[in-house]
Amino acid sequence: MKNELTRLLGIEHPVILGGMLQIGGARLAAAVSEAGGLGTLGQRPSLEAWHDEIKKTRSLTDKPFAVNLPMHAAELDKRIEIVIKEGVRIVVTAAGNPKTVMPALHGAGIVVMHVVASVDQARKVEAAGVNVIVAEGGESGGMVARDRVSTLVLVPMVVDAVKVPVVAAGGIADGRGLVAALALGAQGVQLGTRFIATPECEAPDIWKQAIIRARETDTMVVPRGKAQGRVLKEDAAPGQLMAGEIAGMITATEPAAAVIARIMEEVEPAFKKIEEQVRA
Ligand SMILES: Cc1cc2nc3c(=O)[nH]c(=O)nc-3n(C[C@H](O)[C@H](O)[C@H](O)COP(=O)(O)O)c2cc1C
């Protein structure tokens, strides 16, 4: 598939691995990038460990990959220096306005993507100069916004409000999800929960198994520090394991490359089914 987003990011398929704190490491990010998607390296609290993961990702793939940079990360200036020094081409900022870091990132020729949960935020970060906006609905795993606007509502509204390419995130795990996102005006999708249930993800096996067992009703939103996160209700570790509602659709672990290949194979049949109905 080709569109403005795939050309800008230099990727074959518009499927992005969302940054995942601690568990989205080099192995997973590189596997997604090698499969033609965009792997995003998750945050590590330790600067050194994070730097090592960047170097490791680079050693595992020649393809483009991104690095997640939450605006509240410790030693943000040093992280930006590392990203520039290591020649990272794409940064996904999140949590806060990336305005102050834009001159440094753009000055180094880095493409900046930013995750938003409302139309207002989308307008603000577009004004700050970001190149791509990830519109993340409240059904997603990980930290969620207070208002939790759903992906179906948020994506087309963000698409209408901005000029830059939009990526849909939250509640997507298959080709139908990608087709739906395209129908809403997005140019690609970002997945988190689906990629936890892969052998390349560092999450412990109990986490992967809990996602496989979960139904779509088995997540809840709980306070996490000053914000809130979507977690599995799960009896064994209630409220500990983050995952999105789409966990209900995930029934097995699958290598990251197989996830991407399957999503792309499902696009055409899903699209045809729609076309048949529209033309009937
Ligand atoms: C366990 C977990 C940790 C996450 N950590 C981060 C993070 O550190 N930074 C970030 O920008 N997004 C984070 N996310 C959000 C993902 O990048 C992605 O946008 C989201 O998972 C998409 O929704 P889905 O889970 O329904 O696929 C996390 C998600 C999960 C499930």
Image (tube, grey):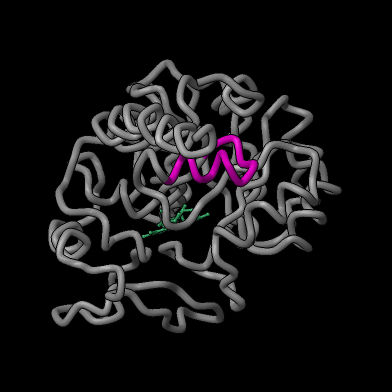
Task: Name above or below for residue 52 compared with residue 33.
Answer: below
The count of marks equals 0
Task: Name above or below for residue 136 compared with residue 275.
Answer: below
Q: Residue at x 28, y 51 (%)?
A: 196
Quarter occupied by residue 183? top right
Q: Whole-percent x and y of residue 258? A: 24, 31
Q: Which residues are magenta?
A: 177-188
Front residue of 152 and 47: 152
In this rendering, position of residue 218 left or right of residue 5: left
Task: Name above or below for residue 132 compared with residue 154.
Answer: above
In this rendering, position of residue 200 left or right of residue 209: right
Q: Residue at x 28, y 36 (%)?
A: 259
Quarter occupied by residue 188? top right
Front residue of 279 and 76: 279
Picture quarter with ligand 1: bottom left
Q: Whole-percent x and y of residue 186? A: 61, 41
In this rendering, position of residue 203 left or right of residue 79: left
Q: Whole-percent x and y of residue 113? A: 64, 41
Q: Residue at x 59, y 69 (%)?
A: 149
Please tell me whether residue 185 belongs to the stretch shown in magenta: yes
